[in-house]
Amino acid sequence: MKIVIIGGSHAGMMAADEILRCDPDNEVEIYDRNKVSSFAAEDISAYIRGDVDFLTDLHFDTEMVKNSQRVRIFQAHSVVGLDTKFHQLTIVNKKTSQTFVRSYDKLIIASGATNRLPLIPGVENENVLVARSYRQVEVLKEKMNSNHKITVIGAGRAGLEFALAARKINKDVQIFDKDESLAIHYVGEKVSGWLQEQMKENGISVRTQINVEEFQQQKDGQLVIKTDQENLTTNIAILAFGFVPNTVFVQNELETSLDGLICVNKYLETSAPDVYAIGDCVSVKFGNEKKVLRTRLATRALRQAFVAVHNIFGQKLSFVPMQKTSGLGVFDKWFAQTGMTLENALKNEFTANLVSYEGPWIQEYGEISSRVVVHLTYDIPSRKLLGVQIMCNRNVSQYVSIVAVMIQNENTIDDLAQADILYEQGNGMPLNFLNFVAQRAVRFEEKQGRGHPRITIE
Ligand SMILES: Cc1cc2nc3c(=O)[nH]c(=O)nc-3n(C[C@H](O)[C@H](O)[C@H](O)COP(=O)(O)OP(=O)(O)OC[C@H]3O[C@@H](n4cnc5c(N)ncnc54)[C@H](O)[C@@H]3O)c2cc1C
């Protein structure tokens, strides 16, 4: 069987790897439009702040794929057309400009997402940058080395990472967002306030409810950013908003959402036979719309690769809705979250509540060395867990994974209140902060006269 993969990054590489593990006799072709495939965008900020020395180290591939005679990787090859009826792709070799047609038995689309430049006058200026592809990050790093004042526009996950990384290398950093508070869609109101405080305390200037209207390059090297509030100056501006899926070539062939994502069912099948789609370019439709959590994460791309490949080989594996588990180092503190914030839960029509816990962590036999803050969101009628956020000055990020699995298994606050979480010796508190926050939720429900505990497996 000939399996063609479009996109050789996380989703595409992992799919090729899994194909080899399932049945190494297949013929696999990977087409990637970049000169350097398997670029690991999630480590861009590590490269900016100098934790990774070489840009070439930012890659995701597997030994099995690299060493296989069965997998052929075509870099600098852009897929420009798809004919699902005849199982054919139109491909341009970007080095020679030649166009050719390739057939497939099964197709996996893993073409990801990219930044779309907004229609702001002056956006084409050489000091207005985006950082998603290998080449873009190469340029950004060069510019950062020779400039001091950096402005990040867009305070979502990527924007926060860029601002934190630039500050770490002592740049003069400001971050803008059009929303009323920082990263509100990503972390919700409570954590947004905390993030804003951390940024300000550590010398990052934060401006919210501000709209950029124009960029103007000055002769002295300054870039003027005209906004609806005032004119600000910088050396370089990094645009960290406006991601779009790379799906132009599927138009009129596959069902897509309004924003261009390829619609797939829970088996990751598209609307055309023998065509699967995975990673940042897809929107998964479940029967229950409440389960749809849109997200662009490498962790999601890799899991989807596993599911799609097994389904190509005749299984019926469902993709498990992801909880958007992610974390962020914020100067000397850590933040991690999984599932929904209270705001997201309410928007998704859950009757949700949030309880918080703040306490010591880790106590070494009475010695309090850190504090942890936990926000837990749950659905009131079913008592099911919906999300958790943890902030601490120790890296306790992995604790959110416990809740991620419990959300996946539809566990309740009553389950978490009693969950058997490892007690690390030397930590003077045998009960974990996750138990504490869930116990608060149970007590709160009792006080509201809704004390009907539900243990999932009695
Ligand atoms: C700053 C930043 C921080 C992040 N942090 C995290 C994190 O902490 N954790 C996490 O899990 N995720 C993180 N992510 C997200 C993660 O990088 C993406 O989810 C992941 O790269 C998605 O993988 P993908 O294979 O679906 O798509 P992509 O990585 O976008 O790869 C798609 C590939 O397809 C190729 N392609 C596109 N169109 C065509 C075409 N027409 N023909 C041929 N090839 C094509 C592209 O060249 C590209 O190589 C972060 C992203 C950014 C930008």
Image (cartoon, rainbow, N blue to C red):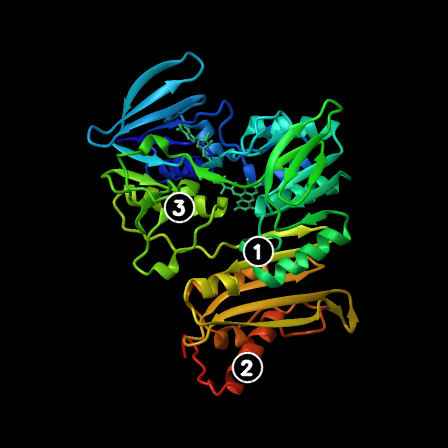
Query: Up-down: is 249 above or below 401?
Result: above
As rendered, which of 42 and 362 lies closer to the eye?
42
Which-is-in-front pick, marks 2 and 1? Answer: 1
Element type at mark 1: helix
Q: Splitting the image into 4 quarters, where does residue 272 fall?
A: top left
As rendered, which of 140 and 317 lies closer to the eye?
140
Q: Is mark 2 within 8 Å of ligand 1?
A: no
Quarter of the figure with the C terminus: bottom left
- Residue that label 1 marks: 184
Q: Amino acid at mark 1?
A: Ile
Q: What is the number of the mark on residue 444?
A: 2
Q: In this orientation, does residue 259 appear? A: yes
Q: Amino acid at mark 2?
A: Phe
Task: State the residue at coordinates (42%, 42%).
Answer: 279
Q: Is residue 267 left or right of residue 388?
A: left
**Farthest left residue?**
85
Earlier in the chain: of badge 3 and badge 1, it is 1
Q: What is the number of the mark on residue 304?
A: 3
